[in-house]
Amino acid sequence: MSPHPLFDLTGRTAMVTGANTGLGQAIAVALAEAGAGIVAVGRSAMTETAALVAGTGAPFREIRADLSSVAAVAPLMEEATADGTKIDILVNNAGIIRRADAVDFTEADWDAVMDVNLKTTFFLTQAVGRAMIDEGRGGKIINIASMLSFQGGIRIPSYTASKSGLAGLTRLLACEWAGKGINVNAIAPGYFDTNNTSALRADPKRSADILARIPAGHWGQPKELGGAAVFLASAAADYVHGIVLPVDGGWLAR
Ligand code: NAD
């Protein structure tokens, strides 16, 4: 069955960072199912994602990059576009988390998280956005935010700062670029079953407390995020700018 024309991404190219696992993999597959070619960016081999995207028939390319440093951005853009490829959709999904009480939190854990989640995300977005503007093509940028873009959380100070910052950055970029045909939005996943939350799920009390407050009654499965990404990447969202869309099983409504 072909997608509704408003959601059809055939002929578009989507760059998805951190596409080798979890939410990034699910987003890459969903965008491919809607027709987009995928440029998957990550630190390690993306064999599983490549196989899943191949199953959709969409083109797939992988680029190795360590997004802990802004120095990765220029070579990444060079490799992505050397053959004339134009990035129509950027999904800033790569992210890390470090857990410790605020009183014990180290500078190293602060910098590591801020570098990947906020600093490189901004400068990669700047590079992709600049190309979209220079070429007059417009495009779609989707940041992967968090419940910690709205709430405080505990034991994750740099993560909360980075994801709250990412929500602000989403709004700033939307204001600067909406008039240039670029839609900048974010998705805020609730509690999903991925590496990012393995420590929470391994803690019986935290795990039960979290589950008890999710109205949908289950942790999110990565596939449950794909539709929101397709929507924000598609013509259906052409007049949607600067939102942070929760996909959270009702967590924030509680
Ligand atoms: P994950 O740990 O499986 O995925 C993180 C991805 O980022 C991996 O592919 C990893 O390789 C990549 N990455 C990390 N550091 C990188 C670096 N230096 N260079 C390149 N790639 C790097 O966990 P996930 O849950 O799939 O996380 C994806 C995104 O979703 C993250 O931004 C995370 O903060 C966000 N998120 C997750 C949840 C959740 O419940 N799982 C909730 C809210 C937000």
Image: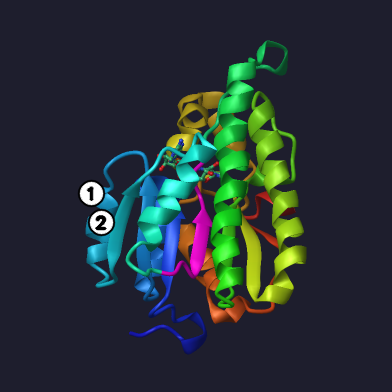
Mark 2–mark 1 CB contact (< 8 Å): yes
Residue 30 screen position, x and y as percent: 40, 65
In this view, 186 is above or below 134: above
Quadrant where the image shows the N terminus? bottom left
Query: Image point 63% across, 33% down: which residue?
Result: 159
The disc at residue 50 is 2
Residue 169 screen position, x and y as percent: 71, 51
What residue would you read off at disc 1?
47
Q: CA distance from mark 2 to mark 1?
A: 5 Å
What amino acid type is highlighted by mark number 2?
Ala
Q: Is residue 222 visible?
A: no
Q: Is residue 110 visible?
A: yes
Residue span colored magenta:
86-95
Is residue 81 located in the magenta-colored stretch of the structure?
no
Residue 200 screen position, x and y as percent: 52, 29
**Residue 14 lies in quadrant:** bottom left
What amino acid type is highlighted by mark number 1?
Thr
Q: Is residue 138 left or right of residue 104?
A: left
Residue 76 screen position, x and y as percent: 42, 50
In the structure shown, which secondary structural element does the residue marked by tag 2 occupy? helix
In this view, 105 is above or below 185: above
